[in-house]
Image (cartoon, coloured by chain):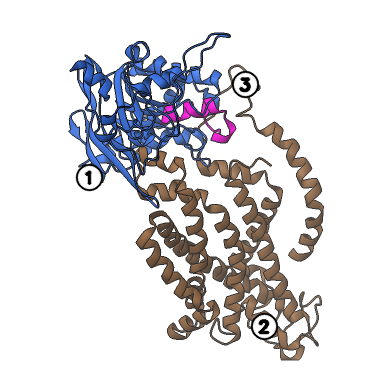
């Protein structure tokens, strides 16, 4: 299948007062056309930075990002601007990501104005069309973001992302700031639009249930690295990496009295400024071995469409 | 005239004005209220940003009052020739320093010139000085401050250190230096007064720009491909506007007074050109014997500034859609 997005050995370092922070540390992934790649991990593991680095909203330190086979990190600013017509983002916080002084019709129209398409595409009609697509009532055209609830605001964010007819959208925790009842609406909207417009998503979330609902494949991140990538089905039925297992066991079961073996991890997530040597999970892994602390385990593929970085798996494979 | 109307209207406003406003607002805000959507109603047209601001400004009675006064003053300036009963330079040495009478509504000054006429002609000069000087400093200061705040680092350092140098020189001294170097006259005075307060605006703008550029909607604008200039003018500056407007309305007053100061030491606008500040300082010598000579130009300055402040406050609120009175 054709890869819309391919990321190779992506790095993003931040210089902080405490030292070099490797927010994204050697990540490789791909996303095929029309599919959704879920990226899960706890707060601060570099999920959002990955999403932004892919769009060059933060400049990656090293690595390669290929969009439809074209390397975008070498593009000049003007070329990158053009590229943005195909790559969009939906932000996590619909309260912070909409300019409070601009009416929502202007917010949705902005991408068109930026590319001088407003007049050409019959701006007002196009905005109405987009609002319709995301389920916003037409009478809201002149309202301001603060007059809307979270769900509607996020719909505005979605409409803005769709204005330029992109092929690929990074959804950066698009529902985690919303009420549970609204979350489902927005998720369904995103899936509906994906099918209608044939979009490709990178879906970032810390909520495994949400990711399970929307993703075809899932990448699990820990401390700036991807530890396991597989299909959405596999990750829930046959997780291989100890961290994935621990993460899955933390999902609450919506049933009274149901007990399950919880894998409780010891200690805190180590600081990304000073990550453990060897396997990054070695400090907290219940199955840690001597070599885990010395050398990083290789990425192996125990089954098709399933890659894991853990000695337990690679040793078993021989 | 203006002064009396002003005094009558002002105290009655706060109570009556606000009560009516609350009532009328419920009726006028239709969009956004989920209940009122009669069948077959026309869809609201997408309104432009400025139409929206004007709509909100109209609802603010105090601001509209200020706006009306400013409008009257501007019209006075334009039609000064028609309104003024006397020429601004015509002296009548037999009737110097007369108190207000039917002949001379606001009395005469130390050279027997009609104060009422001089104030009317002075509107032209003072308004020009106030607005042009503030425009110079707001535009230049705002631009420099926005650049410094948005790009930070080296550019910020270069611009702000330069501003510090300007700020280290007392602004009146700076204005004196500029005027004495390039000569007096209206244009040079406006430029001098404008330049001398650039740093004030640069600092205000820089501070608000710095906090606004970190917000996510700026990143969102970048994500849709907006260029820096668009982001600065469309998203950053509108959100940084409130303190600039407040400072700007006060700035008009300061500019008029600075220009007066320059006239006073003989570097600004030269007599007999009627300039409110110059008239005020000219009348100061007769404050005991003929207080009206200094009083009336002062009242004119006061009314202008008061109206500007009302308008400025209203504008600041109207520019912020989050405020619902």
Q: Is residue A54 left or right of residue B270?
A: left
Q: Nearer the viewer, residue B139 or A215?
A: A215
Residue at 55% x, 79% y is B172
Tell which subunit mark 1 falls on.
A
> What number of labels is visible?
3
Q: Label 3: how many residues lie within 10 Å, few (<14), some (14-19) or many (20+)?
A: few
Was residue B274 drawn as part of the magenta stretch in this picture? Answer: no
- SS at badge 1: loop
Q: Is residue A255 left or right of residue A82?
A: right
Q: Which residue in the protein does label 1 denote?
A: A76
Q: Which residue in the protein does label 2 denote?
A: B281
Residue B197 - label: none
Was residue A151 drawn as part of the magenta stretch in this picture? Answer: yes
Res A318 → quadrant: top left
Q: Is residue B202 left or right of residue A21?
A: right
- SS at badge 3: loop
Measured as percent of width and height from the top left, residue A133 is found at: 43, 20
Magenta residue span: A141-160
Q: Which residue in the protein does label 3 denote?
A: B37
What is the drawing colour of chain B?
brown
Callouts 3 and 2 on one subunit: yes
Res. B272 in view: no
Callouts 2 and 1 on one subunit: no
Q: Nearer the viewer, residue A260 or B143?
A: A260
Give whichever of discs 3 and 2 has the lower sequence position: 3
What is the drawing colour of chain A?
blue
Name, please, the residue furthest toward the front: A290
Q: Nearer the viewer, residue A294 or A242?
A: A294
Q: Label 1: how many residues lie within 10 Å, few (<14), some (14-19) or many (20+)?
A: few
């Amino acid at each position: 299948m054709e890869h819309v997005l391919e990321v190779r050995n992506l790095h993003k370092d931040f210089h902080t007062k405490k030292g070099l922070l490797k927010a994204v540390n050697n990540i490789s992934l791909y996303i095929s056309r029309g599919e959704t790649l879920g990226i899960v991990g706890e707060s601060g593991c570099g999920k959002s930075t990955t999403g932004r680095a892919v769009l060059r909203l933060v400049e990656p330190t090293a690595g390669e990002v290929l969009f439809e086979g074209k390397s975008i990190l070498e593009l000049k600013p003007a070329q990158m601007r053009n590229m943005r017509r195909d790559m969009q983002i939906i932000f996590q916080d619909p309260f912070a990501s909409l300019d409070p002084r601009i009416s929502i019709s202007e917010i949705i129209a902005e991408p068109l104005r930026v590319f001088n398409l407003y007049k050409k595409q019959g701006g007002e009609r196009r905005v109405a069309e987009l609002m319709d697509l995301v389920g916003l009532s037409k009478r809201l055209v002149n309202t301001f973001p603060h007059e809307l609830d979270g769900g509607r605001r996020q719909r505005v964010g979605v409409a803005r992302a769709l204005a330029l007819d992109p092929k690929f959208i990074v959804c950066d925790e698009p529902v985690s700031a919303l009420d549970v009842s609204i979350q489902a609406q927005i998720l369904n909207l995103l899936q509906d639009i994906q099918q209608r417009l044939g979009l490709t998503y990178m879906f970032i979330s810390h909520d495994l249930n949400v990711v399970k609902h929307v993703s075809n494949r899932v990448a699990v991140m820990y401390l700036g690295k991807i530890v396991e990538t597989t299909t959405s089905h596999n990750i829930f039925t046959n997780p291989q990496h100890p961290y994935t297992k621990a993460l899955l066991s933390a999902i609450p079961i919506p049933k009274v009295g149901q007990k399950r073996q919880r894998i409780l991890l010891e200690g805190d997530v180590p600081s990304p400024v000073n990550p453990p040597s060897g396997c990054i999970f070695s400090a907290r892994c219940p199955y840690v071995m001597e070599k885990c602390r010395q050398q990083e385990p290789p990425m192996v593929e125990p089954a098709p469409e399933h890659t894991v970085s853990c000695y337990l798996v690679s040793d078993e494979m021989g | 005239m203006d002064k009396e109307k002003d005094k009558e209207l002002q105290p009655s406003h706060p109570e009556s004005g606000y009560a009516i406003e609350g009532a009328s607002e419920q009726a006028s805000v239709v969009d956004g209220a989920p209940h009122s959507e009669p069948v077959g109603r026309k869809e609201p047209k997408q309104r432009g940003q400025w139409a929206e601001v004007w709509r909100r400004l109209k609802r603010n009675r105090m601001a509209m009052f200020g706006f009306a006064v400013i409008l009257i003053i501007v019209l006075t300036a334009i039609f000064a020739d028609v309104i003024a009963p006397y020429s601004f330079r015509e002296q009548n040495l037999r009737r110097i320093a007369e108190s207000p009478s039917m002949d001379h509504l606001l009395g005469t000054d130390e050279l027997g010139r009609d104060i009422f006429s001089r104030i009317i002609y002075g509107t032209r000069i003072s308004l020009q000085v106030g607005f042009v000087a503030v425009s110079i400093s707001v535009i230049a200061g705002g631009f420099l401050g926005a650049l410094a705040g948005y790009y930070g680092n080296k550019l910020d350092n270069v611009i702000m250190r330069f501003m510090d140098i300007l700020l280290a020189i007392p602004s009146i001294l700076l204005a004196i230096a500029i005027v004495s170097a390039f000569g007096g006259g209206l244009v040079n005075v406006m430029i001098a007064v404008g330049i001398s307060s650039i740093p004030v605006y640069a600092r205000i703008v820089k501070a608000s720009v710095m906090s606004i550029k970190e917000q996510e909607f700026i990143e969102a604008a970048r994500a849709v491909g907006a260029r820096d200039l668009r982001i600065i003018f469309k998203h950053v500056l509108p959100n940084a506007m409130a303190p600039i407007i407040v400072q700007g309305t006060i700035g008009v007053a300061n500019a008029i007074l600075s220009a007066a100061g320059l006239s006073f030491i003989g570097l600004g606008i030269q007599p007999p050109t009627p300039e409110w500040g110059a008239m005020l300082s000219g009348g100061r010598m007769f404050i005991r014997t003929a207080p009206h000579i200094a009083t009336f130009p002062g009242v004119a300055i006061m009314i202008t500034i008061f109206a500007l402040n009302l308008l400025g406050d209203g504008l600041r609120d109207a520019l912020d859609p989050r405020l619902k009175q």
